[in-house]
Image (tube, rainbow, N blue to C red):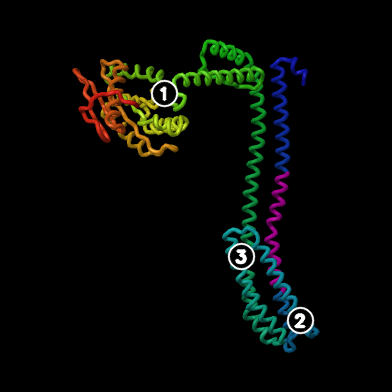
Amino acid sequence: MDFLKNVSIKIRLWIIMFTMAVLILFVGAIGLNGIAMTNEALDRTYKDSLKPTNIISRIMLLMDENRVHIMLGLQHDPKNHYPKKERSEDSVRIHTAAITNNLGEITILLGEYKKRKLTSEEQDITNLYAIAHTQYANDGLVLAINALKEKDFQKTSEIFLNKINPYYKNANLRANTLLQKIGEIAKNNYREATERFAFIRNILIFGTLLGILFASIAAILLIRSIVRPLNKAVSHFKHISEGNMDENISVSSQDEIGQVLSELAAMQGKLKIMINELDQLARTDELTGAWNRRRFEETVETEMDRLRRYGQRLSLMILDVDHFKKINDLYGHSIGDQVLIDLSNTIRASLRASDSLTRWGGEEFVILCPNTTAEIVSNLAERLRKEISSIKFQEVGNITLSFGVAECGSEETWEQWLHRADEALYLAKSGGRDQVKTIRRTSSRLIEKETTKISGASSDDQVKPVQH
């Protein structure tokens, strides 16, 4: 195969496509041969399907032989008018023994027939036939055998005429009905199988011809498409060098050009992932996965611009874990970190899609709520407070949160707005913790509005420094 390295891609493609065509023809030939073999197997299957017919026919023959043996036994009656045969004990015994053997063989044949997978209709007909044969055997043949053994030819003749003949006629009718049903099922199965294999044969022939056509078309298209992938590869390299990582690099072949494009796409994907990871690290708190201050500052400027332009309401809450220092002192920083992780996951699951959670520092978080009033955010904070206080955290148990809520004024900076929320948090802390406080701004002064509390703190509380 080394000589292919010295020929052009065009020649190599022609060789590949010619090989494909030969392989398709080879596969088609194998398929046609397989169809021929399948047809032979189908013929054998049909012949095998006739075995039930042979079984039932053999049973009918044995039934008729039993009837004949009774008639032959009656010829040993000294009073009959038929030509006399040699009368002996052995002659009658031979006939009765033959009947007994035939009944045993019929029982075996019926059992073998019932082992087959029968349709519901075939099963019903088989049951009716079995009942008719049982009546013919037990109520006719067995009684006649006993009468013959006792040399009661008169009784035997009566049983023959009144029971054996009508029972035989009924059983024979049931057997013929069963044979007819077996024939119908065999013909239907064979017809369906023939249609199925004919369909497969036609599909294979059509697929082979279609494959040859497609191989020819593909050869022409591949030969004509050599230059286009080269130009695309050059264009992709240029875009990546310019920093464009979003362009889709499609790989349409597995030749040398396809391998180059594939590696280029993989490199672009890895570069894009690395850039996104770096951006995520730069904008996300490493421990909790919440936003960091950088991302919050980028977002809050956009939301405040919407407030000034379109009058959309904008609120936030600051929350702080009560007595978090005790958790670190009693259980260690690893447990404290896990509490913060579980806490942030719980909060995120309770927020709206438009809200965002930011870790502001230590055990303090900020939740930004666009297009929302302070009253709505206070209700959300109260719901979060109750939800968190009902959760048992790993090893620590229950914890409580204090909340400070503030709605942004159109003339405020975000630092002033955040400061008001921080003051509300101080009020919640100094008022006994585990509560929600709201401070809203009026035109002349700051008014502290208590939206929810558990204990302590009223509207007259003084803002004092409080240890978080």
Location of residue 134 (image quadrant): bottom right
Q: Residue 328, image x and y in percent?
A: 43, 30
Against 145, residue 230 (above or below) is above
The magenta stretch spans residue 245? no
* Residue with the mark numbered 1: 291
Q: Horizontal and vertical percent for residue 202?
A: 65, 38
Give whichever of discs 1 and 2 has the lower sequence position.
Answer: 2
Question: Does residue 8 appear anywhere in the picture?
Answer: yes
Judging by the rendered image, the residue that carries numbered circle 2 is: 93
Q: Which residue lies furthest to the left in this view?
A: 444
Q: Which mark is residue 126?
A: 3
Q: Residue drawn at (64%, 59%), measured in percent from left and top?
A: 182
Relative to 433, 103 lies left or right: right
| Residue 55 within the segment the image draws in magenta | yes
User: Do labels 2 and 3 touch, CB within 8 Å?
Assistant: no
Q: Give the range drawn in magenta.
A: 37-65
Callouts 3 and 1 close, C-beta under 8 Å: no
| Callout 2 amino acid | Arg
> Which SS does the magenta portion mostly show?
helix
The residue carrying pointer 1 sits among few (fewer than 14), some (14 to 19) or many (20 or more) residues within 10 Å by Cα, namely many
Label 2, residues with CA under 10 Å away: few <14, some 14-19, many ≥20: some
Q: Nearer the viewer, residue 332 or 232?
A: 332
**SS under mark 2:** helix
Q: Where is residue 56 in the image (x, y as percent from the top left)?
A: 68, 65
